[in-house]
Image (cartoon, rainbow, N blue to C red):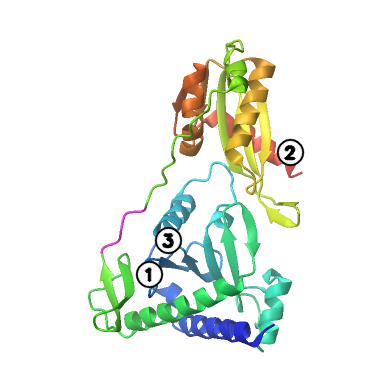
Amino acid sequence: MERSILEQWAKLYHFTREISALEPWERLSESDALVYAQKGTEKELVFSILGHEAPFCGIACYPSWTAFSNSRLRLDGENVRQEPVFMLQDAMIGIWGARKDVSKDNYEIIKALGLRGHGDGSWLYFEKYAEGFYPATLSEAEVEELADAMGNLHMMMRAIYENRLPDYKPGMMLLRWYDEKTKLYMTHPFPMQKLAKPSYPVIHVEENDYFRSTADLPKAAYTLSLDWSYLPFTTKDGGQEFFPKLLLGIDQEGMILCSDLLAPNKNQINMVFNAMDQLFRRAGKPKAIRVCDRELEAILSEFCQKLGIRLSYTKTLSSLNRVRKMFIAHMTK
């Protein structure tokens, strides 16, 4: 490993261990947001202290408020889909875990730094999480970015623990930024922002000959209940490990009409349209489609409108959840 990148790893480990000495998980929870506005950019990194809800202590760094919001909304939800919700974050995370949890690459880094753990919960390692993919070792650029950000988080934590922020209380948002006028870093508490709920653009459908042939298909009497969710196990494609997404559709009797596995590195929108096209050519167009996912609703909105299919959104599809539970149990035997 090059000396320059090893120095960045050393810097990252140093600041993270300094933060852990303050035992921040005793005072802060996952929902507390500590925001660092990167100097010279418009990027805001959001830190979350793990330890109340997670089965281990850690520090998560999200690349945006949206990524932090998505994580909180997922982790705070009921997870009726049985998704591996912690694995579906977009974040760089430092974890104090067991030796068995440390990957070969991370162990080599720890060894090169002359560090080690002493029992479960004492092995510090870092991983990059991206929705749909199994966690990976940080890249050189990510190590450099996180080392700088962790240094600034350390200053924020010291300000809290040294009582230099009398107005700050857990549940507020703490912001640190570089002030160009004073040439100083500023740290100040603000009321917590509302979580940013995801929004999805409607997908426009081109009316080509292939689409028109689908439109001419006969309409059948069934109603399609449709949903997609990440499965709680991984597979590999070209050496890349990921969580497959199951697109599952049933009729009103609970019969499975489609069950397609989607990879996160593929065009999932096209795969949804292809699955619908195959189903319609086999069973006819449904009179209605019910979904409980806003992204699926946006994908199918114009598609259903042009095909004369009634599309509706509902908060939950209980019958589909039961079928999915049995489907997952069968696949994980």
Residue 33 coordinates in the image, percent (x, y): 38, 65
The N terminus, quarter of image: bottom right
Left or right side of 277 for 27: left
Report the disc number at residue 17: none
Counting residues from the start of the chain, the first of labels 3 and 1 encountered is 1
State the residue at coordinates (46%, 21%).
Answer: 305
Please count the marks in the image.
3
Left or right side of 136 for 193: left
* Depicted 220 relative to depicted 211: above or below: above
Residue corresponding to mark 2: 330
Residue 169 coordinates in the image, percent (x, y): 28, 71
Q: Amino acid at mark 1?
A: Leu
Counting residues from the start of the chain, the first of labels 1 and 2 encountered is 1
Residue depth check, mark 3 versus mark 1: number of the one nearer the observer = 3
Counting residues from the start of the chain, the first of labels 3 and 2 encountered is 3
Residue corresponding to mark 1: 34
Residue 227 visible somewhere in the drawing: yes
Q: Main secondary structure of the magenta part?
A: loop
Within the image, what quadrant is residue 67 found in?
A: bottom left
Residue corresponding to mark 3: 64
Give the residues in magenta.
191-195
Question: Secondary structure beneath disc 3?
Answer: loop
Foreground: 295 or 101? 295
Q: Amino acid at mark 2?
A: His
Q: Amino acid at mark 3?
A: Ser
